[in-house]
Image (cartoon, rainbow, N blue to C red):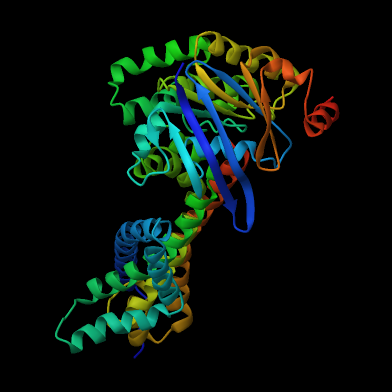
Amino acid sequence: MSAVVKLHDIHKSFGAIEVLKGVSFEIDRGEVVAIIGRSGSGKSTALRCINRLETIQSGTLEVCGHRLDQPTLDLRALRQDVGMVFQSYNLFPHLTVEQNITLAPRRVKRLPNSQARALAQESLERVGLAEKIDCYPEQLSGGQQQRVAIARSLAMQPKVMLFDEVTSALDPQLTGEVLRVMETLAQGGMTMAVVTHEMTFARRVADRVIFMHQGRVWETGPGEMLENPQTPELQAFLSNGL
Amino acid sequence: MGGSFTVNHFLYLLQGVGWTVVLSALAFALGGVAGFGVMLLRTARSALLRRISFLYVQLIQGTPLLILLFVVYFGLGVVGIELPPLLAAGVSLMVYCSAFLGEIWRGCVESVPRTQWEASEGLALTRWQTLVDVILPQAARIATPPTVGFLVQVLKSTSLASVVGFVELTRAAQVVNNSLFTPFLVFGIAGVLYFALCYPLSRWSRSLERKLNVGRRQAA
């Protein structure tokens, strides 16, 4: 197994506040890693560093062969390899589901218009929403919008997918439908980094769990570690979460 | 002096209306293009470009249009560039519009949530592609009411072009009044004609605003 995402000693500050204080971890090809922790623990920031939505101050960061700590970085090539799904879906409200999905493939990968619909159809089938292809985002429920956002990301055929608290804005029922889609992706061999508050998902689907605390990787291990936390901080986090 | 207001006087005023409309359209078309450029600079990534365009906007917004008109018409005349009144007025109004429209549109572009930029970036779209395909279509919806509202202001501001001898509605009214000396009547009619031009635009602007408010509105 080769690591496709490698963070080593990453430091990141917003002004005077250091949010990442030497974060290191790796994600192997096909691995699903859940990143958990309190708000402000730096987990979302760490994730956003992986596709350069945030720049790092120091450390080495390599994603799919792209060196993010080097000035020679080809940003657009990186973004084609890394897909990202956000908490607030961030669909384009003025475009239909089909247009949302095919905009980037058409513009970035020069996909001919004649093939666009087929690509949208195929991506939507993977998230179980093929019948919504001509809807506008506002006509969909939150869970459906988030699944469209996943389909939009999938249509770019990323090698790694990042999920930033993608179910935090959803009620429990809608959360379930999104998590099921993510589980299917995981079983399909997608490399995934998932920042989440869903402990059940972390335990059941993730190959490895990373617990972040105060800007550091505090504890890491397989899903079972959540049943047997080693550090008092993880223990406290888990008991508060219930 | 004297005589009474005839159909010919009225037709002369209507001709003035025509030139007011032409000048407004010219100002708005040219100002729109330049304003788009100002908006791009005001939202540029380079801090220097943002700074320069900010100063431009401040300078123009802080200067009376009349002064701008004098600078272009008389100022350029002194250095040997003789512009016909229509062109001088058109250029002055273009500069004036570019600063205001650029600033209105900057606000609209910036009111599109930051996360739309992030989502586009994450999909490997370039900055320009993001602007054209994602940001501007959303910003345009927000921009329409204030833009039409500003058009009303521009239309009325064209009256200032009368001071450089351009015979638009205000100047036409002056000419008629100078021969009849019935200011209440003549300027009253001119006022009504301005109102007839502006009121439909105001109504349109307001109805656009209403449509925007009840229409597709994204929850944050």
Q: Point out residue B121 in the picture as x, y percentages from the top left corner.
A: 44, 38
Q: Point out residue B50 in the picture as x, y percentages from the top left corner.
A: 41, 64
**A206 or A26: nearer the eye?**
A26
Q: Point out residue A17 in the picture as x, y percentages from the top left corner.
A: 65, 54
Vertical arrangement, residue A221 with respect to residue B10, above or below: above
Q: Quadrant of the C terminus of chain A?
A: top right
Measuring 58% from the left and 30% from the top, which residue is drawn there? A89
Q: Is residue A176 left or right of residue B22?
A: right
Q: Point out residue B59 in the picture as x, y percentages from the top left corner.
A: 42, 77
Res A111 → quadrant = top left
Kindly tell me whether residue A27 is visible in this rendering.
yes
Number of numbered markers? 0
Res A107 → quadrant = top left
Vertical arrangement, residue A95 with respect to residue A222, above or below: below
Vertical arrangement, residue A207 with respect to residue A217, above or below: above
**A208 or B138: nearer the eye?**
A208
Measuring 38% from the left and 78% from the top, which residue is drawn there? B160
Q: Is residue A65 left or right of residue A239?
A: left
Measuring 54% from the left and 38% from the top, which residue is drawn there? A48
Kindly tell me whether residue A201 is visible in this rendering.
no
Q: Residue furthest left?
A: B80
**A130 or B179: nearer the eye?**
A130
Measuring 40% from the left and 58% from the top, which residue is drawn there? B39
**B43 or B46: nearer the eye?**
B46
